[in-house]
C-alpha cells in the first residue's frame, strides 16, 4: 500500500504539503504528477506548481533527480521511502488546487505523486487538521471511502488505486451542507463561499433531479455515495465531473432564495450545471472512449468522440430538468433555443466538423483566440444540437417509439457497466442496431460534415416552430423574444466589450462590416460618425442609419488613433426562437408528448 498525507502547512503562502510513503521501495522509484485532469482536455502541467521536493529513507536524505517537466527519479532508498512535496495552491477553478484563510480545495491530479508501475496498488490518505486558528471550524467534504475520521472529517481515507485517489476532489472549509438519498444512495451538496440560499429547496430539487437520472439509466447508480462540491462566487461558472462527485463553481445569485417563487432563469442555470455533471457519472466517467481506457495522464489522449460525451450530456442536462418536473415545457424550449443560438452565432461551424472539434480539443477548445469563433465549433453546443437532431430523427423514423434514450441505455449496458471503452465509430453502429434506422447519411452530415442540420423540418414534425431572427441587443441570448426594435437592427459585425474609452473588439466576424473596414480584434472603437460609442449606446447610434450606409469610424490600434469607413449591414439572423405550432396535427402532438412529456 502507498500512503499519502496532506497538511495545510502555510496558508498565507498558499502552500499544501503532501507526503508520499512507499514501503519496500525499489532501488529507483520514478514519480510524477499528471499533466491534465480527466474531463478537461488541456495539458495543464500540474508539476509546475511544485515549489519543493525532497525524499528520505530511514530518516536519511536520498537522491532526487528531475527527469522531465513532470517526473522525478528517487534513488538509494532502503526499507521505506518518504517523498514530500510542497505545492503552491492558488487556482480557484474546478480543475486546480486552492488554499487561503477561508477554504482549501484540491484535485488529486494537482497534489498526489503517482508511482510508476504501482498505480494499481491500493492507497491510503491521511488529512491533517490545520493548526491555523482560522481553520477551527473547517470540515472535510469528499466522496472518498472513509477508514477512520473525526467529527470534522479529518483522518484516514482509502482508495483502491491511484486512478481512484485522484478522482475524489476534497473540500475543506466551513461550508454549508445538505443531505438526501436518491436511488437508495446517500447524496450531499456542500456550498463554500458566501451565499444566502434555501437549502431545503436545493435538497428537494436535487433529489428530484438525481432520481430522474438514476431512473433514466436504471438503478442502482454506479456509486455508493455522491457529493456535489460547490463554490459560490460573485461571478463564475463551471463544473468538472468525477466518479462519485462533481466540482461546481457558480454565482451566489444563481441559488434560490427562501420564499422565492417559480424557477428563475438564474436558478435554472445552477440546476442545469448540476444536471450536466451528474449525468457524467454515467456518460464519460464509466461509458467513455476507448482512447481513455486507461487515461494516459501525461500526454494528449486523442478521440473524435467527445461530442458524444459532452454534446449528448449537454442535450440531456436540460431535458432531464423537464422530465424531473423542475422546469416547464416553455422554459425548456427557451433554454434549448439559447443552445442553438450559440451554434448559429459561430461561423466556424462551416469550417470545423464535430469530429474534428473533438479531436482538436487539446489545442483549440481550451485555447480560444480572437478568430476561434470564425474557425471552430464547440463539441458541447453543436454536439447538443446533433443529439437533438438524432433523437428527433429516430423518433420520427420508428413506429416502436424508440429514441436516443434507448441508444444511451444500450451503451450503458454493453460498455458503461462492464467498463468497456467505446471504439471510434462504435456509437454509430450501436445507434443503428438499437433503432433499426439507417443513420450513415445522418452521421456523415452531422458529425463529419459542416453543413447545417435541417432542424426546422425535424422540429416541425413535433409541432414546434424554429425561427431565426436578429439579436435585439448584446444581452439577447436567444429563446423568448426580448424587448427591442421589431426591425432588423444594424451591426458592425463584431463582438465587443467596454474598454479603453470605447468598445474593444474581441472577435471580428468573418465577412462582416468590421472585417471589410480593416478592423481587427483588440481595436478600440471610440466613435462612429463622429459620435462617441460605448457598449451601452452603440445600438442607439446605429439606429440612425439605413442599411448599406457608409459612415466614418475612429479607433485606436496599439494606442495609435486611426480612422476608416464602415458600411453598416443588417444584423445576421442567428438568434433562435422555439415556439409551439398554432395548429399541430394529431401525429405532431403524439410525437411531442412522447419527447417532452407535455
Image (cartoon, grey):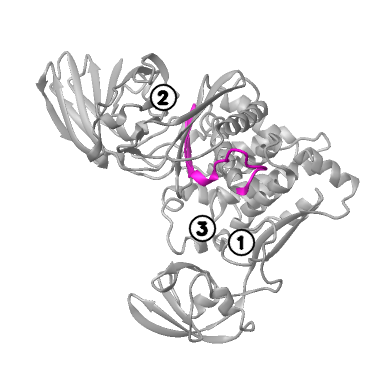
Q: CA distance from mark 2 to mark 1?
A: 43 Å
- Tell me the element at label 3: loop
Depth check, front residue: 553 or 519? 553
First in sequence, mark 2 or 1: give its number: 2
Q: Work out whether mark 3 precedes mark 1 in sequence or the reverse, and give the earlier one.
A: 3
Residue at the extreme right of the image, as rendered = 586
Q: Which image quadrant is residue 120 in?
A: top left
Q: Nearer the viewer, mark 3 or mark 2?
A: 2
According to the picture, the residue beneath numbered tag 3 turns out to be 376
Tell whether label 2 touches label 3 (CB within 8 Å). no
Whether residue 264 is situated above or below residue 552 in the rendered picture: above
SS of the residue under disc 1: loop
The circle on residue 388 is none
As rendered, which of 528 and 403 lies closer to the eye?
528
SS at mark 2? helix
Question: What is the CA distance from the residue labelled 3 to the residue labelled 2?
Answer: 34 Å
Q: Nearer the viewer, residue 226 or 137?
A: 137
Distance, label 3 to label 1, CA atoms, is: 22 Å
Q: Is residue 251 magenta?
A: yes
Q: Residue 164 has which mark? A: 2
Which stretch appears magenta? 239-265
**Residue 112, picture quadrant:** top left
Name the mark nearer the viewer: 3 or 1: 1
Above or below residue 88? Residue 555 is below
Q: Position of residue 100 (x, y in %)?
A: 30, 38
Q: Residue at 65%, 53% (x, y): give it.
A: 445
For the point 59% across and 47% down, which residue is it? 383
Amino acid at each position: 500500500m502507498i500512503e499519502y498525507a496532506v497538511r495545510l502547512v502555510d496558508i498565507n503562502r498558499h502552500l499544501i504539503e503532501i507526503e508520499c510513503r512507499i514501503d519496500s521501495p525499489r532501488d529507483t522509484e520514478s514519480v510524477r504528477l499528471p499533466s491534465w485532469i480527466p474531463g478537461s482536455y488541456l495539458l495543464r502541467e500540474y508539476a509546475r506548481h511544485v515549489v519543493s521536493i525532497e525524499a528520505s529513507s530511514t530518516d536519511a536524505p536520498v537522491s532526487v533527480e528531475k527527469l522531465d517537466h513532470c517526473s522525478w527519479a528517487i534513488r538509494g532508498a532502503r526499507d521505506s521511502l518518504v517523498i514530500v512535496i510542497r505545492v503552491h495552491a492558488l487556482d480557484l477553478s474546478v480543475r486546480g488546487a486552492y488554499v487561503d484563510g477561508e477554504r482549501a480545495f484540491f484535485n488529486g491530479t494537482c497534489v498526489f505523486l503517482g508511482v510508476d508501475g504501482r498505480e494499481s496498488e491500493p492507497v491510503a490518505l491521511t488529512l491533517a487538521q490545520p493548526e491555523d486558528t482560522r481553520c477551527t471550524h473547517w470540515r472535510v467534504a469528499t466522496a472518498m471511502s472513509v477508514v477512520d475520521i473525526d467529527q470534522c472529517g479529518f483522518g484516514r481515507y482509502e482508495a483502491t488505486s491511484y486512478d481512484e485517489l485522484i478522482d475524489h476532489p476534497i473540500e475543506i472549509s466551513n461550508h454549508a451542507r445538505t443531505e438526501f438519498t436518491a436511488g437508495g444512495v446517500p447524496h450531499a451538496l456542500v456550498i463554500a463561499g458566501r451565499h444566502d440560499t434555501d437549502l431545503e429547496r436545493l435538497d428537494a430539487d436535487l433529489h428530484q433531479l438525481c432520481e430522474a437520472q438514476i431512473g433514466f439509466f436504471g438503478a442502482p447508480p454506479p456509486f455508493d455515495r455522491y457529493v456535489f462540491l460547490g463554490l459560490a462566487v460573485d461571478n463564475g461558472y463551471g463544473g468538472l465531473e468525477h466518479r462519485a462527485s462533481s466540482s461546481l463553481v457558480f454565482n451566489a445569485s444563481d441559488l434560490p432564495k427562501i420564499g422565492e417563487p417559480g424557477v428563475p432563469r438564474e436558478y435554472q442555470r445552477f440546476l442545469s450545471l448540476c444536471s450536466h455533471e451528474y449525468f457524467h457519472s454515467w456518460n464519460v466517467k464509466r461509458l467513455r472512449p476507448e482512447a481513455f481506457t486507461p487515461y494516459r495522464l501525461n500526454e494528449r489522449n486523442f478521440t473524435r468522440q467527445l461530442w458524444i460525451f459532452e454534446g449528448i450530456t449537454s442535450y440531456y442536462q436540460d431535458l432531464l430538468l423537464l422530465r424531473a418536473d423542475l422546469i416547464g415545457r416553455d422554459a425548456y424550449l427557451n433554454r434549448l433555443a439559447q443552445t442553438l443560438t450559440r451554434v448559429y452565432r459561430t461561423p466556424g461551424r462551416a469550417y470545423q466538423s464535430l469530429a474534428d472539434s473533438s479531436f482538436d480539443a487539446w489545442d483549440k477548445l481550451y485555447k480560444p483566440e480572437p478568430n476561434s469563433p470564425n474557425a471552430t465549433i464547440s463539441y458541447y453546443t453543436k454536439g447538443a444540437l446533433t443529439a437533438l437532431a438524432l433523437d428527433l430523427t429516430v423518433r420520427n423514423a420508428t413506429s416502436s417509439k424508440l429514441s436516443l434514450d434507448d441508444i444511451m441505455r444500450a451503451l450503458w449496458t454493453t460498455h458503461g457497466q462492464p467498463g468497456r471503452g467505446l471504439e471510434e465509430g462504435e456509437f454509430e453502429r450501436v445507434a443503428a442496431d438499437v433503432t433499426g434506422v439507417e443513420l450513415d447519411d445522418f452521421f456523415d452530415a452531422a458529425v463529419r460534415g459542416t453543413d447545417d442540420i435541417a432542424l426546422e423540418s425535424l422540429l416541425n414534425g413535433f409541432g414546434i416552430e424554429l425561427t431565426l431572427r436578429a439579436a435585439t441587443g448584446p444581452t439577447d441570448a436567444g429563446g423568448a423574444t426580448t424587448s427591442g426594435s421589431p426591425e432588423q437592427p444594424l451591426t458592425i459585425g463584431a463582438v465587443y466589450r467596454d474598454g479603453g474609452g470605447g468598445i474593444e473588439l474581441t472577435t471580428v466576424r468573418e465577412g462582416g462590416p468590421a472585417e471589410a473596414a480593416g478592423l481587427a480584434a483588440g481595436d478600440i472603437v471610440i466613435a462612429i460618425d463622429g459620435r462617441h460609442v460605448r457598449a451601452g449606446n452603440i445600438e442607439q447610434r446605429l439606429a440612425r442609419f439605413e442599411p448599406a450606409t457608409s459612415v466614418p469610424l475612429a479607433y485606436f490600434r496599439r494606442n495609435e488613433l486611426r480612422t476608416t469607413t464602415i458600411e453598416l449591414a443588417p444584423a445576421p439572423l442567428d438568434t433562435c426562437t422555439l415556439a409551439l405550432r398554432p395548429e399541430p396535427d394529431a401525429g405532431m402532438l403524439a410525437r411531442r408528448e412522447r419527447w417532452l412529456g407535455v
